Amino acid sequence: MPKTRASNKKLKISPEKELEVLRKIVELVSSELDLSRSLNEVVSIVNEFTRADSVFIYLFDRQHKNLTLMASKIPHKKELGVIHIRSGEGITGWVAQQNKPVAIAENAYQDKRFKGFDVLPEDQYEAFLSVPIVYKGKVSGVINVQHKKPHEYADEMVNLINMIAKQVGGVFEHAFLFEEIKTKASQFDKLVKVSESITSQAYLDEILNLIVVVTAEILNSKICSIMLLDEKKHEELVIRATQSLSQEYKQKPNLKVQGSLLGDVIRNRKPIMVEDVRKEVRYVYRDLAIKENLTSMVAVPMIVKNKVIGVINVYTQEPHHFTEEEINVLQMVANQAAVAVENTSLVSEAVRAKEALETRKLVERAKGILMRLHNLDESTAYRMIHKKSMDTCKTMKDIAESIILIEEMAK
């Protein structure tokens, strides 16, 4: 554990102070599973006995395989959850990779392992102590303590932070799992809303608009859209719903299936992920993506009764690697949306068939009236109704109803 000479004396911790710290940690371990509260409490406890100018806590993100800044003594609301460090990157990443603490008394920013962030002024602090958070033998995070002036970290301080890190590793892990359960429960509730829309009497556009809004919430995306194959030739994808406020995005032209990136989703019946659509040659709307500040995209096929009827696209503003879990959730939504489209189409077909039958009955009745009143044959009576429909721009049903009404009023 490298150390350098510091201009100030080591800060000693009294046995009474150490007992007080351990008591607080015990209370935290037995407290409610709230990740944000637990993180802030640990920052407060560490800050109290180290008298540090800065305290950071990074947690290992299992989905993205990196360390993420999750808590800080100094408010960094915009940076929390945003700053990521790969294992082995910087002093923090080195500590996580090696599962060893590092204490540097001065000129920490000159250490060859050091990596700075422009948004974190603490990176210019002199002294740096970094300790791994361990749970069940694996590193789950890192606690960093920094001082503006040179500061030699006493062994007893390093050992105490080490002890804290081992104790809170389980707290953070359980709290993180609890947060995941809450997230999954929220996703499930939203999926239920989508399922309920399938059996509703709402119009198709209303159902699809509900689905894109719910999906955008689930995946925290900037834009979500549903594109369906054109009904006649199935050669183009037509945008049918989006929660985007951009009129230009809503009015973008139909997309040819042949030769397009989203066309591959239709043909291969598999999701496609793009890290940056602005740089993807086969992505047709690159100029629009730049204007709308769209970066990463995932598109999944909408499948019902073993046929693909369209795609659901999700875009993010920041670069994002879509996890297998996120894609699975999106695929569930896509398939439910496909069922909604299919069900609504079947209902529409049934309604059209019913209307066609009603129209046929009325036209037959109107033909009979014309044949009787004007001594016409069936073919001539039909052509008369059809011609009147064309001349007046009214449906044959309307003309037939008028003939029937006149005949009934004459009685």
Image (tube, rainbow, N blue to C red):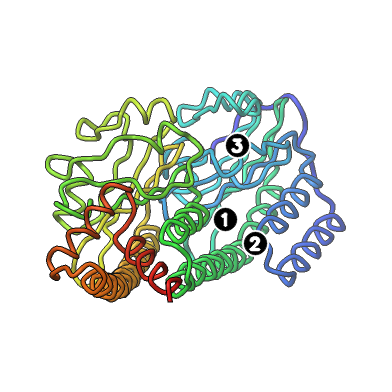
Who is closer to the viewer here, 157 or 400?
Answer: 400
Residue 264 is left or right of residue 357, and the answer is: left
Query: Residue 103 at what x, y percent from top left?
Result: 60, 39
Q: Identify the residue under disc 3.
A: 79
The type of residue carrying mark 2 is Val
Who is closer to the viewer here, 8 or 256?
Answer: 256
Q: Identify the residue under disc 1.
A: 133
Residue 269 is left or right of residue 350, and the answer is: left
Relative vertical location of residue 148 with respect to residue 189 in this rendering, above or below: above
Q: Are marks 1 and 2 in contact (CB under 8 Å)?
A: yes
Relative vertical location of residue 304 with respect to residue 240 in this rendering, above or below: below
User: Split into 4 quadrants, where in the image is the C terminus?
Assistant: bottom left
Q: Does the image show residue 385?
A: yes
Q: CA distance from mark 3 to mark 1?
A: 21 Å
Which image quadrant is residue 254 in? top left
N-term mark: 3 or 1:
3
Label 2 secondary element: helix
The type of residue carrying mark 1 is Ile
The type of residue carrying mark 3 is Glu
Q: CA distance from mark 1 to mark 2?
A: 8 Å
Q: From the viewer's perspective, is the residue at label 3 or at label 1 nearer?
A: 3
Q: From the viewer's perspective, is the residue at label 2 or at label 3 nearer?
A: 3
Res 168 label: 2
Q: CA distance from mark 2 to mark 3?
A: 23 Å
Label 3 secondary element: loop
Quick one: label 3, few (<14), some, or many (20+) residues within 10 Å? Answer: some
Label 1 secondary element: strand
Q: Does the image show residue 328?
A: no
Query: Residue 326 at what x, y percent from top left?
Result: 40, 58
